[in-house]
Every structure is written in C-alpha cells, then in structure tokens.
Image (spheres, rainbow, N blue to C red):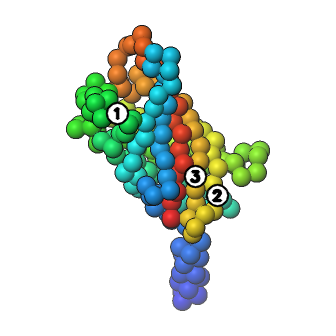
Amino acid sequence: MKRIFLSFSVIVLSFALFSQSYTPTDEGSKVHFSINNFGIATGGNFKGLSGSIKFDPANLAASDFDVSVDANSIDTDIEARDNHLRKAEYFDVAAYPKLSFKSTRITKTNSDGYFYLFGTITIKGVTKEIKFPFTATAKNGGYLFEGNFKLNRRDFGVGKNSISLSDDLTVSLSVFAK
C-alpha cells in the first residue's frame, strides 16, 4: 500500500513540476483589432489581460488558455470614439466588462514553431467557436504567444448594420505570459 501511495505521489509531483502555468501581462503584450471604416483601416487596443495559460509544447493535451481583457480599456487614440464604443450598442462595458477566450484544444501544425488553437470567444455574452494558428516563443522566463484571427462583429451584437463600418475585423495578439 505504501508503494502505491509513494508511486502515486511521485506521478502527481512530476505533473506539477512539468506543468507550466503562466500569467498573461499587459507589459510586453498587445491585443489589437483592425476594422475598415469608410474604407479606411482603423483600430484599437485592449489592456487588462488576466487569466491563466498552461503551456507545454511537449504535452499539448495538458495545455490550456483561459484569458480575458478589460472591455473598458478600449483605446483607439480618440477618446470620443472610445466612449462611444463603450456604450450598449457596441461593447456595453457596464453589462459585459470582459472579452474572454477559453481554449478547447491545441495541436501542432506542419510548420515548426506553429500551433493551432481551438476554443471559444465570448463578447457581450455571446460565445462562438474560433480557431487560429499561433507561435509560442520562449522569452524572459515566459512565453510570447502571437497569432491573429478574423471575427464578424455583428455575430456578437457589436454595432448595428452600417454602410460605413465593415462587419469583419481582424484581431492580432501578441501576448506575453510569465
């Protein structure tokens, strides 16, 4: 019985030692979106990264991303636009203070250093499945995760039908976690 307990303890301790948990930080990170407005590319950034990332390139089955950004932190370099985007018609930050992503699985790709991330994104209480390629670069005791994906803003109830504002946007991530 002692041997079984000892063996079990060694296995649990091994997983704890080799399972790497990281915390995303605003420092060294950028969560950026780009959208066409009147045919001109415009965009902004979000801050307030929080959550946890478990990442082990040798054991992707044990890896997991559960992260969010502060919706109120939207910054387009135009304060009046930022305030407009915080209202109920767009991000409704009073009712939905976070934009969140939760992974469901991570796989390798055919290219060295590239992975594929599958998961769900939640904006304004609407959850949709997404997938996108990303890279993970070891850096300063952590990882820099970079990737981008496309969304349709109207799928999440962000804004209404518009002849000037595109429905489709691109989200570019450069997230440092340590």
Of 137 and 119, the residue lying toward us: 137
Chain-order first, disc 1 or disc 2? 1
Amino acid at circle 1 = Ile
> Which quarter of the picture shows residue 26?
bottom left
Give x and y (percent) for residue 28.
Answer: 50, 56
Give x and y (percent) for residue 68.
Answer: 40, 48
Q: Which residue in the protein does label 1 denote?
A: 78
Chain-order first, disc 3 or disc 1? 1
**Under tag 3, what secondary structure?**
strand
Q: Which residue in the protein does label 3 denote?
A: 145
Q: Is residue 117 visible?
A: yes
Residue at horizontal 30 percent and vertical 35 percent from the top: 79
> How many C-alpha atoms fall within 10 Å of the one at disc 2: few (<14), some, or many (≥20)?
some
> Which quarter of the picture shows residue 136?
bottom right
Of 15 and 167, the residue lying toward us: 167
Amino acid at circle 3 = Phe
Q: CA distance from mark 3 to mark 2?
A: 7 Å
Question: Residue 137's mark?
Answer: 2
> How many C-alpha atoms fall within 10 Å of the one at disc 3: few (<14), some, or many (≥20)?
some
Amino acid at circle 2 = Thr
Give x and y (percent) for residue 1.
Answer: 54, 86
Q: Is residue 56 above or below residue 165?
A: below
**Under tag 2, what secondary structure?**
strand
Question: Residue 90's mark?
Answer: none
